[in-house]
Amino acid sequence: MELRTLKYFITIAECQNFSKASKLLHISQPTLSRQIAYLEEELGVTLFIRTKPNIKLTQAGELCLEKSRDLKSDK
């Protein structure tokens, strides 16, 4: 797991939208989606409930967001 991927995850969670997050991060939306799919696979959990136009965090996603923010603030 890379810190960059956690940054992507936090941005998506805050924006509640993959397209908006990709614009803020200056990466393509498919690349961002792929990175989150890899993260979900690595963790073995689903992080987002994908609905249009926005997304919501799963319970696992909420926990991951809390832990990711803790890591980010430790830096």
Image: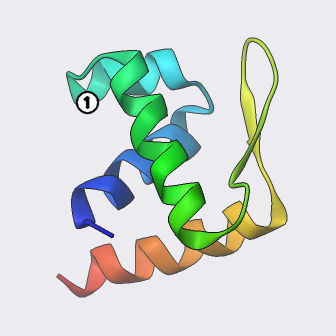
Q: Amino acid at mark 1?
A: Leu
Location of mark 1 (residue)? 25
25 sits to left or right of 37? left
Circle 1: element type: helix
Q: Residue sitting at 58 percent across and 71 percent down?
A: 43
Scheme of colours in the image? rainbow
Q: Position of residue 61 (x, y in %)?
A: 69, 61
Q: Is residue 23 above or below residue 73?
A: above
Q: Position of residue 53 (x, y in %)?
A: 73, 12
Quarter of the figure with residue 49 = top right
Q: Residue sitting at 34 percent across and 81 percent down?
A: 71
Quarter of the figure with residue 35 = top left
Q: Position of residue 3 (x, y in %)?
A: 25, 66
Q: Nearer the viewer, residue 35 or 67?
A: 35
Q: Nearer the viewer, residue 54 or 34?
A: 34
Q: Is residue 4 above or below residue 72?
A: above
Q: Nearer the viewer, residue 39 or 15?
A: 39
Number of marks drawn: 1
5 sits to left or right of 44? left
Quadrant of the rendering where the C terminus is positioned = bottom left
Q: Residue sitting at 52 percent across and 24 percent down?
A: 18
Q: Is residue 26 above or below residue 64?
A: above
**Local crowd size for mark 1, using a 10 Å CA cut-off: few (<14), some (14–19), many (≥20):** some
Q: Residue sitting at 82 percent across and 66 percent down?
A: 59
Q: Position of residue 1 (x, y in %)?
A: 33, 70
11 sits to left or right of 51? left
